[in-house]
Image (spheres, coloured by chain):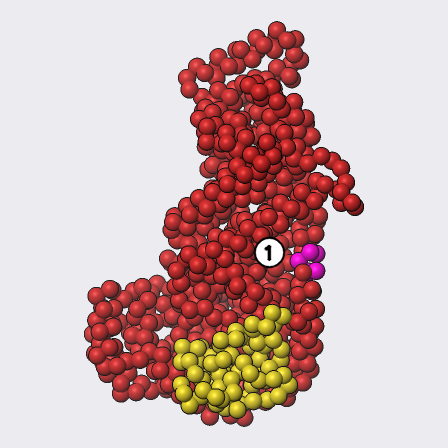
Chain colours: A yellow, B red
Amino acid sequence: MNPNKNKMRGSDISKGHNYKIKDFTNSNIAVKLLILGFLPGSVISLIRKSPFGGAYYFDVNGNRIALRKNEAEAIVVD
Amino acid sequence: MAKKTSKYKIALIGNPNSGKTSLFNSLTGMHQHVANFPGVTVDKKTGILKIDKDLSVTLIDFPGTYSLYPNSDDEKVVAEILTNPKDKDYPDAVIYIIDPFDFKRQMLLLTQLQDLGLPVLVVLTMKDLAIKQGIKINIKKLSEQIQSPVIFFSNKTKENIHEIKSGIRNLFENKSRVKTCYSLTSHEKDIVDNFRDKLNFNTDYQGLLQIHHSEWLKYIPKNLKEEIKDYKLKIGFNDISLQIQETLERYRIFNKKIKGIINFKRNSVKAITDKIDDIVTHKLIGPIIFFVLMLFMFQAIFSWSELPMEWLEDGFTTLSNYLKVNFPQNWLTGLLADGIIPGLAGVLVFIPQIFLLFLIIGIMEEVGYMSRVIFMFDDLMRKFGMNGRSMISLISGGACAVPAIMSTRTINNWKERLITIMVTPLVSCSARIPVYTLLVVFAVPDKDIGIFNARGLALMGLYSMGIFMALISSMVMKYIIKTKGPSYLMISLPEYKRPIVKNIGLYVKEKVGAFVFGAGKIILMVSIALWFLASYGPPGAMDKAEKQAIETGAKRNLSEEQTLNLIAAEKIEHSYIGYLGKSIEPAIKPLGFDWKIGIALITSFAAREIFVGTMATIYSVGSTEDNLKVSEQMAKDVNLQTGEKTYNSAVAWSLLLFYVFALQCMSTIAVVRKETGSWKWPVMQFLYMGGLAYFFSFLIYNFLN
């Protein structure tokens, strides 16, 4: 997991910018994200955070999906 | 071919929110049957579709799922059945439903289904909306590329429903095999070959899935599970990384195939949904909108249902009185008029409330709002050991815990679901209202504190206490209950869409039906038992009591009605239930309760509102219609030993708190037993809630005394 240590994660991205998914850090989460259409190369952007800040509302390739913080952290973006 | 049979089973499969249930409703209409998949509480809806005069097929609506690698119990059902050709629900063919707005992702499950060797008919839904929004699909080319027939369908217009029918017929007529999408790696092939004789599968991919899921698949015998596990270790079969590999490979293959087939210029639909979400999921406005909606919902549930509830009550009272007057006075009339009818009434009067509750929840779900609620409150609920999805259950609990507990099925994590089930009955349900309104009269004087009525404030306090205790309890359980499996949010937020009336209608019908038949059976049984216990006593005891009451009535010169009331009161004291009440008196004395309250506690175990009716009987008020009369009689009751009034504010508060916390509801116990699959949880729930009730009643009684 070290090569990804300092990379930007899904939980770090700021609103209104497009990012590209590069990789995942946790294969247990990755395997479920893949099923939902989070693929390496997919374009991801943050629409907003939940009122209490613990959940993220993403647009991934045009699909709207909400993730928990730890789930978003498993996404390495560029 | 046999005529009018439904020997063919067709599975409806699709991602959540793909429009699967809508299509199922369109195809089967009202001819649906809801049951459970064997061994689980996941709903299995089946319906018959008549293709033409000599062919009918059975459609099975499977739970929505994203892939054959399941995340929740619902999804596991799909994998359990589709990997097992021996399963009695194993389909002959599949209708795969795709939401065109989210096309690519759904190809994944399609290729998995094809690799199982199942004939697949693809139905793209929401044709009207998709065309309006500028989605262009080359259906013919798509069909060629994915090697399955494709039909573009609208649940609104239903114009080409005949195409679906002939599509199904064709599935059985030309059985050309689809070329496998995913080829097993040599590693995977090795393990499948190794178990080829011991497992039962149609295609290698099916075998691979059996091996992947061998740990939890029910149809794989235990010794074989061990053998597979050992072999996996031996050859270094890593479930997760192989699954990742397979998923990526599938995406790679079909992305190439469907390139350029679907064109979607992003325009207004996206914009509309995004505009709504800007407000509805806004950090501040979002939760406010939600709470206003909830306020409106409860207002609707309690005020709109008032009138129909009265009608139902009056109807049952009339029926019961009619029986008593017009039929011979024997045990059967008694059982009907005093046991079964009031028992049924106890359940059925709640139908208007349950109906409204599910109508509103159904609309919120149908338009796509519910997933936004889950997104907004997931993190908050997690702090209490629950899940965003628990919010829906807790809210429903304000009307009735039974449907609320049934709605926890969508929670994918077992621990979070269990906690939600365990604490939901602490939210004050509508059955507590009659009890609260009767007792609050004795607890609080009728005066104003500032601009508020003191009794109104007390009622609000009781509700808040329930909610507060639900949150505290869930936090405690978070640390006690051991985790079973990981927890995910990962929820898709679908396009907002206009609700289809028929879908909501069927949804409400199903939920109300589940309530009536689920809770109804139990309440009926208990009310028969209670009727027996209250109508019969040890030999001779009741006759003696009746004789004495008649004598007393004559001595005191009571009117006929007063004498009858006195007889009823004396009889219940000497019935089995009267003795039961007396026998538990030592246990409830520290709470300030006497044997009469004891009787009411026992009878209202069936359903809380029975408390009022029992009090009416004990205090010999002929009718139970008027709370006021009951409370007047109760106010006169004096403790013979101390000479003080029985219902002082200490006793009343003690009773109120008892009803806030105690699990006085047979139907809840029954539904928890059903949903958790064991007696362990309902028993624990009964004990912990009873413990809370006893503790707080004891505390307040001794504090106020």
Residue B242 seen in this snapshot: yes
Residue B546: x and y in percent read 52, 14
Please report the residue visible at 36 percent of the width from the left and 67 percent of the height from the top: B80
Residue B611: x and y in percent read 57, 34
The answer to whether B256 is drawn above or below residue B168 in the figure is: below
Please report the residue visible at 68 percent of the width from the left and 34 percent of the height from the top: B441
Please report the residue visible at 31 percent of the width from the left and 80 percent of the height from the top: B238
Q: Residues within 10 Å of mark 1 (few under 14, many from 20)?
A: many
| Span shown in magenta | B292-296
Q: Secondary structure at mark 1?
A: helix
Kindly identify which residue carries mark 1: B395
Of residues B118 and B351, which is closer to you in this image? Answer: B351
- Is B145 positioned to the left or the right of B508 in the image? left
The answer to whether B493 is drawn above or below residue B587 in the figure is: below
Residue B83: x and y in percent read 34, 71
Circle 1: residue type: Ile
